[in-house]
Amino acid sequence: MLRDVISKRESELPPSSMSTFLKVASENKKIISLGPGEPDFLPPANVIACVKRNASKTTHYAPVEGLAELRRAVAGKLRKENRVRASAGNVIITNGSNESILIALMCTMDPGEEVLVPDPGFMDYRPVVELLNGYPAPYRISGEDNFELDPDLIRQSVNKGRTKVIVINTPSNPTGNVLKRKTLEEVADIAVDNNLLVIADEAYEKFVYGRAKHVSMASLNGVQDNVVTLQSFSKTYAMTGFRVGYSSGPEKIIGAMKKVHVYTSISAPTISQFAAIEALRTGKNYVERARKEYERRGAFLHKRLGEMGLICAVPEGAFYLFPSIRNTGIGSDKFSQLMLEKAKVAVLPGTEFGKYGEGYVRLSYATAYDRIVEAADRMERVVKKFN
């Protein structure tokens, strides 16, 4: 019998309850899931048509860095929409932005070095750093400040000689916050002054609401050499199953990522890259309709949660709400379990997103409006028992 076959790095990964919640939700059709961060829309019709047209022509590997036509199209989009100086040479196409996170860190962080990660923040950041034998150093994102990043905390967290990377996420998963230009400028100054890399995760860039505006850090003056930007087709065009995202940044770093990509997955799926080219040709109306519908859902759910006494920041971006449940007197895990068992609604405990997620839960409104209405009614009946 094999003994000690599982690596220490794997065995020390923090346990996650997400898979349990999602498994129960998928198996029990009575449960309304507000858990997954996955659009409920279909991709644009022209994307589906493109897949049907090209299925028999795309059965071979794409180039490691991605199809040239797609990289040129992405670079054009970055220049026009994000105001980021880009060319096909400093773009790499990956299997979703998750793979971009992995290979960007593989190329820029050595074992034992620190990566500053938001807490609460996207659940993949910390484990990926740990899998690479790095040290994830959390910087707190406070609900008292509407989850706006505090640059002073970043500055205080920099460990000279050890800190290598700062990860930022805007619009944010799980908080729904959109970082302000002034905040980004201050973080950019910290990165430049300390010779640090910023990995800017902008997967939800197109979904911003109200007065909020998305700003790509790489568009700021003087910081381009310090930023790798991660973006994706998954959320914008409801293409999560296609697994296609991209990174842009300094050619030296993107070149290193191309070299490593051979050893992770070789290339993103060829058929998905054809679909991505077609997605970029899609008119703005598709994305704007999705954005408006998410804004409608978020506003409704925010109002209903407030009526239950579950206070949260007004949604600015992405498609998540992160309400405080402290007034119920129970922790995030137990609250989520009660919602699953008593209300038949799946929400995720805030602890999935870091230590400072305790006292919160994440709700996704990437599901149909009528299902959100029913979920809110069910939750209210259970929450009332705490009052």
Image (cartoon, helix red, strand yellow):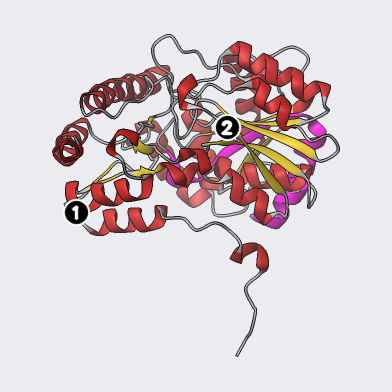
User: Type of residue at label 1?
Assistant: Lys
Q: In which quarter of the image is residue 149?
A: top right
Magenta stretch, main secondary structure, is helix
Quick one: 370 or 304, which is closer to the camera? 304
x, y percent for residue 192:
80, 22
Q: In this view, does 162 lie to the left or right of 106?
A: right
Residue 321: which quarter of the image? top left
Q: Is residue 114 visible?
A: yes
- Apparent side of residue 364 relative to residue 205 in the rendered image (left or right): left
Q: Which secondary structure lies at badge 1? A: loop
Give the residues drawn in magenta, as a range. 239-264
**Residue 259 against residue 153 in the figure, above or below:** below
**Residue bearing mark 2:** 140
Tell which circle, 2 or 1, labels the residue nearer the N-terminal end.
1
Q: SS for tag 2?
A: strand
* Residue 241: mark in rendering: none
Can you tell which of label 2 and label 1 is closer to the viewer? 2
**CA neighbours of label 2 inside 10 A, class few (<14), some (14 to 19), many (20+):** many
Name the side, left or right, on which 289 lies relative to 72. Answer: left
Q: Report the quarter where the C terminus lies.
A: top left
- Residue nearest the observer in this picture, 348 or 262: 348
**Where residue 29 is drawn, which disc sits there?**
1
